[in-house]
Amino acid sequence: MDVTCVDISANDLFEYSNGHFLRDERLQFQKRRVTFDLRKLCDVVASVSDGSPVCSIDKMEGGFSKALLMTTENGTEVVAKIPCPNAGRAMYTTASEAAVLHYVQTSTSVPALKVLAWSADASNPVGAEYIIMEKAPGIQLFKVWANISAVDRLGLIKKLTQLEKQLASIHSRAYGSLYFRHSILIDSERVLLDSSLDPSAMFCIGPSCGSAWTDGTFPADISSDLDAGPWSNLLQLGIALSRRSVARTHLPVAGNFPSHLQGTKQDHVCLHNTAKSLLQRLTERSHLWQSSKPTLWHTDLHMGNIFVSEDDYTQITSLIDWQSTSISPLFVQVRWPEFLKPPEDYPQGFVHPKLLSNFEELSSDEKEVALFKKDQAGNSKAYEVATYLNSHEVYAAGWQVDNALRELFKRIGDTWDDGIVPFRTCLIDMCKNWEHMGFQDSCPIHFNASEIAIHEGQAKDYKRWHDIQDIAQRYLDTDTEG
């Protein structure tokens, strides 16, 4: 086999080659190293390319997968994606991604890539899980964004919200991850889609494929008691996430928080016990049901994952990287795309962003920053308004559900890793906003003035700690893993 590996040796295909880590580098490299039989992988690619052999390979390193652009002698270009050990649960992560891509590509007009071949069984001839998919057509948005006019940016943003509306219209029966039905063998671990969504009964909702549920993450005597889904209602989901957090208290502390911000094992257990009564009451709230419906959503829409037509920048040709996509409550899923996040002091609602009242008094550098923020706010406003016009349902879930509720479900499953402060903040905010959220009777949990005062001091310390981390990461051009 004569294959050219562009700018990299065949053995280096297995290693992480996108830089270094400032801490735990050996461990970080191990989490991103995966071996496989290159010849067998090329055979699979040839089988979906009319038998034409692979003649060149270009590696595109990711944080959770190896992505190989493989070109055959007849000019066919495909992408082979091989998950690293840190990608998520073995078998489940690949099986779910393949199913999501196929479902979205065949059942909606959302431009997902076509899957040509896949295997979630690492004992296959390739020696690793893989997905072979078509190469994304078009050009990545970050390469052309600066050249797109304001009018075309508006058109692009409208198209994006129209695609998201389609995803929101898929009414699933449970929370979890999407799979082909044959991938989940245990009947109790799968819930079929409604026949209107899946007439051939090809798909099902199964256990979460998220890395937080990875086998071996928890003590052996505890992991068997955890419920990774699927979950039929919001209460089951919340309780399962809470139990996951409590189970992690048996492990060494993962973060580098000061001890008073991390909290003791007993602190976490007590706070989760407090949260259970709150979860029970929340799930009884009927006007929350529409915003909490199980929804498939792309939660990582940055400009590298969006491809547009080179001839018309308003046309989205592909959304890539659906790995670890979940079916979760709509109010948890809806979020600002990374490149459309609003600046500070963003005026939510139907208010047009304006320049500062003292704009003319600013220095030239300050004016440049102010104009940038106004432009940023304008893009955010376009997304917010387009979402409202395209789907009141999505808008209500993203902009009208109390943020404390959203944060509660984002935080409750990872309190041991995130420290106890953000979780306690959610619960205190829920108490404060109880009536505003539509409840007529008293909140089932309570914090006295002394507890709130102590917490507010810890919250300030927690923010300062994170601010220092953010400054260090920006200065060192790194992320939370170093």
Image (cartoon, rainbow, N blue to C red):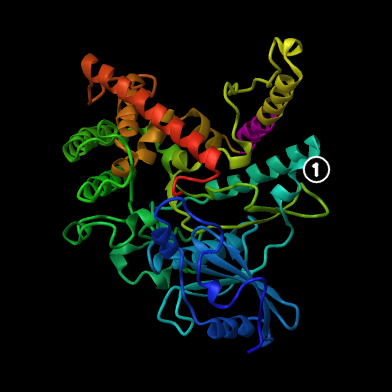
What is the quadrant of residue 160 in the picture? top right
Tell me, yes or no, if residue 261 can be seen here.
yes
Q: Measured along the vertical axis of the image, is residue 187 above or below residue 376?
A: below
Is residue 161 within the magenta segment? Answer: no
Q: Quadrant of the N terminus?
A: bottom right
Q: How many marks?
A: 1
Residue 367 in the image, given as x and y percentages of width and height: 73, 20
Q: Secondary structure at mark 1?
A: helix
Q: Residue at x 57, y 34 (%)?
A: 392
| 421 to 93, vertically: above or below | above
Residue 189 location (% of width, % of height): 31, 63
User: Neighbour class for label 1 at 10 Å: few (<14), some, many (≥20)?
Assistant: few
Q: Residue 284 falls in which quadrant of the image?
A: top left
- Is 477 left or right of 55, judged from the image as shown? left
Q: Nearer the viewer, residue 461 or 205?
A: 461
Q: Nearer the viewer, residue 232 or 409?
A: 409
Foreground: 444 or 77?
Answer: 77
Establish if 261 lies above or below 26.
Answer: above
Residue occupying the point 49% across, 28% down: 400
For the stretch drawn in magenta, the main secondary structure is helix
Circle 1 is placed at which residue position? 147
Q: Range of the magenta residues? A: 378-390
Is any atom of residue 198 visible in this view?
no
Q: Seen in the image, is 269 located left or right of residue 63?
A: left
24 is higher (above) or lower (below) than 187? above
Q: Position of residue 444 (x, y in %)?
A: 22, 26
Residue 53 x %, y %: 67, 86
Three-letter residue code for mark 1:
Asn
Of 324 and 405, nearer the camera is: 324
- Residue, far right: 311
